[in-house]
Amino acid sequence: MDLTAVMSQLKSLGTSQAVKTYKRHGAGDDVFGVSYADLKKLKKSIGPNHDLALELWQTGNVDARSLATMVADPDEFTPAHATQWMKDVTYPPHGAEVAAVIAESNFGVSKMRQWRKQKSEYARTTGYSILACLLKDDPDIVEESEGRRILKDIEMEIHRSPNRARHAMVMAVIAIGVYKPELTDDALEAGERIGEVQVDHGDTACTTPKIVAYIKKSLKRTNGRKAKIRR
């Protein structure tokens, strides 16, 4: 499928209700309102197509950009592409979607280290979102000593960081606590000291979880699954 065909299909799949929902989450006017279920079906029919992904992203359309992150090939992604996509993000869900692609590239760790230290909202947000993705897929990719440094940085900086970055930093502490057992206690202690983190999610029902409660709940769920498997 070429760009024209895909954009036509996206437009036909959009609904006015989804448009309203996406706009509440920060989408501008260039949005069709395609459900993620339909986007995933399109992803399956298109398959990996990096050239198309770059064209879809360039349109600026919210739905096209979400689809772009789904059909992009991390192996063909370049640091320049990654930087441009991160800078283009204005719709909050795209931040996590872009981070997921970068995390699968061969420069995911370097971008995580670079961007998490930046002051700009979406650079820091994407950096910490990459970290959460990396840990979920391969906990050993971040060594214990680096994990401790990251927890210390978050504890020192989170309450004076930009709005969306605060949410990503919370999720990073949770990821460290859940996916790196050797740092679970460190993450819980950091979470206690950090306390509740205020994040403005706009006119949505989205919330930022409480670090300690979320880590404990996630570990309890994981341990419960392991017990069932052993039985």
Image (cartoon, helix red, strand yellow):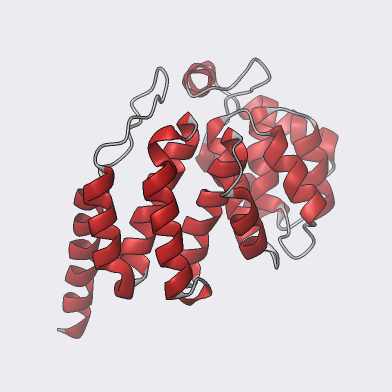
Above-or-below relation of 45 to 204: below
> Residue at image x 22%, y 80%?
229
Q: Position of residue 70 (x, y in %)?
A: 64, 50
Question: Of residues 225 and 209, which is closer to you in this image?
Answer: 209
Question: Of residues 182 and 171, which is closer to you in this image?
Answer: 182
Q: Position of residue 130 (x, y in %)?
A: 55, 55
Q: Is residue 33 visible?
A: yes
Above-or-below relation of 207 to 98: above
User: Quadrant of the image for the C terminus?
Assistant: bottom left
> Residue at image x 38%, y 62%?
176
Count all numbered tags in the image, as a single digit: 0
Outermost residue on the front side: it is 156
> Residue at image x 68%, y 41%?
86
Above-or-below relation of 170 to 6: below
Question: Of residues 143 and 9, which is closer to you in this image?
Answer: 143
Q: Position of residue 68 (x, y in %)?
A: 70, 44
> Residue at image x 64%, y 22%?
31
Q: Position of residue 123 (x, y in %)?
A: 62, 41
Q: Left or right: 144 with respect to 69?
A: left
Outermost residue on the bottom side: it is 230
Q: Is residue 139 visible?
A: no
